[in-house]
Amino acid sequence: MTEELWQLALHTLDRDVCTCITDDLMATNALTGEQVDAVTFWREINQLYPCRSFELVKQAMMQHAKQR
């Protein structure tokens, strides 16, 4: 079951689902060291870049530049 949940977390596009699954897997110590490292990296990237759409970020930056 752990491997199936891990695969689901890896392939889902829904961040909330991925976070829920990985939180549960980490809480039960079901992940390998490599998987824990991957989850940690994924969380750091999501904190640094919360918007998943490059186009939305680009539009926001252009609007911000116009306001100056």
Image (cartoon, rainbow, N blue to C red):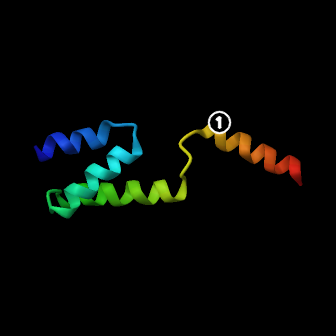
The residue at 40%/45% (across/down) is: 15
| x and y, in percent, of residue 37 in the image | 29, 60
- Above or below: residue 21 compared with residue 23: above
For label 1, the SS is: helix
Q: Amino acid at mark 1?
A: Glu
| x and y, in percent, of residue 62 in the image | 79, 43
| x and y, in percent, of residue 32 in the image | 17, 58
Describe residue 55's horizontal placement relative to residue 4 as left or right: right
Residue bearing the label numbered 1? 55
Describe residue 45's horizontal placement relative to residue 59 as left or right: left
The residue at 20%/55% (across/down) is: 25
The residue at 20%/63% (across/down) is: 27
Give the number of marks: 1
Q: Quadrant of residue 38?
A: bottom left
Describe residue 49's horizontal placement relative to residue 22 as left or right: right
| x and y, in percent, of residue 34 in the image | 23, 57
Q: Quadrant of the C terminus?
A: bottom right
Query: Looking at this rendering, what residue extends furthest in the left direction?
Result: 1
